[in-house]
Image: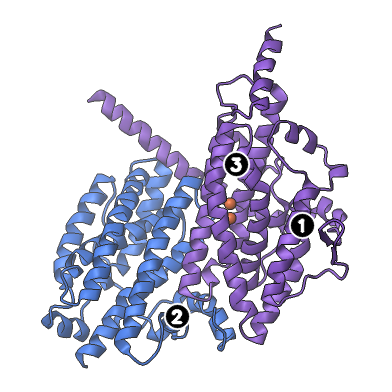
Amino acid sequence: MTTKEALFKYILRIGDTNLILGQRLSEWTGHGPFLEEDLALTNITLDITGAAKSLLEYAALVEGNGRTEDDLAFLRNDRQFFNVQITELPNGDYARTIARQVLVDCFDFYFYQELSKSKDETLAGIAQKSLKEVTYHLRHTSAWLERFGDGTEESHNKVQLALNELWQYTNELFEMNEVDEILIKEGIAVDLNVVKTKWEKHISDLVEKSTLIIPQNVFMQTGSRKGIHTEHLAFILAEMQALPRMYPDAKW
Amino acid sequence: MEINKFEDVFEGKLAKNEMIEPKDWMPENYRKHLIRQISQHAHSEIIGMLPEGNWITRAPSLRAKVVLLAKVQDEGGHGLYLYTAAETLGVTRDELLNNLHTGKAKYSSIFNYPTLTWADIGAVGWLVDGAAIMNQVMLQRSSYGPYSRAMVRICKEESFHQRQGYEIMTHLAFGTNDQKEMAQDALNRWWYPTMMMFGPPDSESPNSENAVKWRIKRETNDQLRQRFVDQTVRQVEYLGLTVPDAHLKWNEAKNGYDFTEPNWVEFKNIISGNGPCNKERLAARNKAHDEGKWVREAAQVFAKKRSEVYEAA
Ligand SMILES: [Fe+2]
Ligand SMILES: [Fe+2]
């Protein structure tokens, strides 16, 4: 694998994770638990979808064969997507949406901190912008985790159940392969072991503060680094890609 | 005696084009009219999030997705300003929402039509937001301060929405044959419903007279409708599309178009619950509200726990 190929795959991994998470979150817009929170979650969705757009634009540029960010988003098949599986899971209730968001926001927070030091200036720039946004997202979603954990019995049970069921998807965030190996040598990619240590400490403190428990001895799911997904992704793409696929000659 | 004096002050302010503020005395029917008008407007913004939100997950480009998300979010923001303005008149948001959820309160009938294709997102932005602007521009100078100020912010954003909607229509109308067909079809379906947004003909509009007197409205339904048609026909022509009205004709004498009135029987049916999406829209709002109940409760209980901890410390 050349450095360029590795970089393309690396950007897709980050871009797809944002794209699919934004796609899922956008299902909440207009249906949130109350108006202020609907607006706040949509803000997060907008930031994440905006980041996806910048990243896929850059991926298309790196690839250099004339594809655009929209071609990458709307004309690839599910096996060519590299988003982590946790992003494609159905939203579930608001506790599950928040729990997933905290786990991913916290990852992004430390990931973008590292990535903003990347020798690749475009990636570093995107990371710096996203870090500002994610700092706010993490504050917002952490506050909700605490409210649910230490709110009513119902909210506590719901959010604990969500953590229990989501935990098996968390290890994927930190998996590294040949792509990382090549790019870490170049000072471009982030060492995810560094992120993992910080993430574990942060989440463990937050979960404890929220009177919740981190699930133990969980068997971890894997696959997204190879483009292997849950059953949900193909449905997401069928919906998201419908128009560009139905009208291949059209510009929007 | 007292009331008369208050009323003189109120009338005096209206006469001098001064704002009425929440702490000022106001006649009870003025207050009632405003609560009804502002809350209906707020409900329309919130319900309006649904037909447009319907296409967020299927927006055909990343840019279109971001623009639509932001638009739907803006509409939610409009709802929020307006509920807040209504609350200054002595009602709570809970009461207003309850009226919406039980079907007691009305909202703009336009949102009971379905968004069937992507072109509908263009047509809604262009025509529906366009008609809303025409209705709302005059409300920026309405006599009630909080309403008037909310409308200044809202109108600015609505004109963005209209431009974005027209931009979608432009892409379609100058795109492939399929896209052009999609654009014409959307125009065909949204033309008359949009004209209904200005309300029934003046001869049958019971609320218009007071509204004009109180400067809550400044032009009549028919005047606004005429202006909308005159303005929009030119935009339709630029797109190379056809207004779905065989009787549309320029009338030199009145310096405006003659046009076919929308079907007022259909209008009455839709505002009384028989439109294609009335039930779905209300069901979606009720579902979100009901499923959000435990979330709102958790937040309240948590806040109470924390304030007790704070007080004990
Ligand atoms: Fe609006
Ligand atoms: Fe709007």
* Residue at screen point 21% across, 93% down: A2
* Residue at screen point 53% across, 53% down: B157
The residue lying toward the viewer, choosing from A163 and A60, is A60
Chain B: colour as depicted: purple
Residue B312, image x and y in percent?
25, 24
Chain A: colour as depicted: blue
Left or right for B243, reference A49: right
Quarter placement of the N terminus of chain B: top right
Left or right for B244, reference B67: right
Residue B194 shows up from this direction: no
Q: Which residue is mark 2?
A: A70
Which is closer to the viewer, label 1 or label 2?
1
Which numbered dot is residue B140?
3
Name the image colouring.
by chain
Q: Amino acid at mark 3?
A: Gln
Marks 1, 3 in one chain: yes
- Image quarter for ligand 2: bottom right
- Residue A81 lies in what quarter of the image? bottom left
Furthest toward the front, the residue is B253
Q: Amino acid at mark 2?
A: Asp
Which is closer to the viewer, label 3 or label 2?
3
Q: Is residue A149 above or below residue B30?
A: below
Find numbered disc 2 in the image and state the secondary structure of the residue it sits on.
helix
Which is closer to the viewer, label 1 or label 3?
3
* Residue at screen point 32% across, 69% down: A169
Residue B200 shows up from this direction: yes
Residue B279, image x and y in percent?
71, 54
Left or right for B261, reference B80: right
Marks 1 and 2: CB-CB under 8 Å?
no
Find numbered disc 3 in the image and state the secondary structure of the residue it sits on.
helix
Marks 1 and 3: CB-CB under 8 Å?
no
- Disc 2: host chain: A
